Amino acid sequence: MVADVATAKVDSRIANNAENIAAYVKSLAAIKPAGKSRERFSVRDHLSQTEKPSPAVSTSLTSRKRPSPSPTAIPKTLKCFCPDSRVNDIFDELRKLRLDRNPNASGVLLRLLLEFSVSHYLDSTGLIKPLLEHFRKKDNKGPPSVPTSLRQV
């Protein structure tokens, strides 16, 4: 069917009504693959009767070179779009600091980057106010203070 449509042997004008479609399908029965009834067959079985099959196509994919892991905690290609200068400064330091030479400093700076990013988000969206109220009521202390741990945030 696909070959007939591709070669314009059949189009919507030829098979326009149910009778024409039924006649076309009956004409396909003549090229039905040989084999036992209800047996599985492949396209190659069908092609071997009507035309010479093409050689098998290799399905193996060419291996792509995987990018080497970044020697820093943040790859050079990653960009920071945060307007907060503290977040940008730590982000830039993490892009320069090598993990193999400074694993502990990288871990601490990643933690600071997360905390400062969350703090900036809470400040810019106004979600810090209910959080500060919650801790002020909980501690019964004077003016509300900024949550100090990531767990509090």
Image: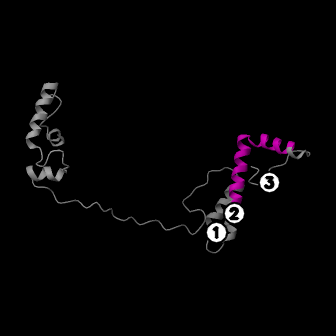
> Disc 2 and disc 3: Cα gap in Å?
16 Å
The location of residue 90, given as percent across then percent down, is 68, 60
Q: Residue at x 58, y 55 (%)?
A: 79
The percent position of residue 92, horizontal first and vertical second, equals 64, 61
> Closer to the camera, 38 or 10?
38
- For residue 48, above or below residue 63: above
The amino acid type of the residue labelled 2 equals Leu
Q: How many C-alpha atoms fall within 10 Å of the one at disc 2: few (<14), some, or many (≥20)?
A: some
Distance, label 2 to label 1, CA atoms, is: 10 Å
Q: Residues within 10 Å of mark 1 (few under 14, many from 20)?
A: some
Magenta region includes residue 52: no
Q: Residue 14: in sight, yes or no?
A: no
Q: Look at label 1 and name its amino acid.
A: Leu
Q: Secondary structure at mark 3?
A: loop
Q: Quadrant of residue 148?
A: bottom right
- Badge 2 vs badge 1, beta-carbon distance below 8 Å: yes
Horizontal side of residue 146 vs 86, given as left or right = right
Name which of mark 2 and mark 1 comes first in the sequence: 1
Q: Residue at x 13, y 48 (%)?
A: 36
Q: Which residue is mark 2?
A: 109
Residue position marked by numbered label 3 in the rendering = 148
Q: Nearer the viewer, residue 14 or 101?
A: 14
The reply to whether residue 151 is visible in this rendering is yes
- In magenta segment, residue 126: yes
Region in magenta:
111-137
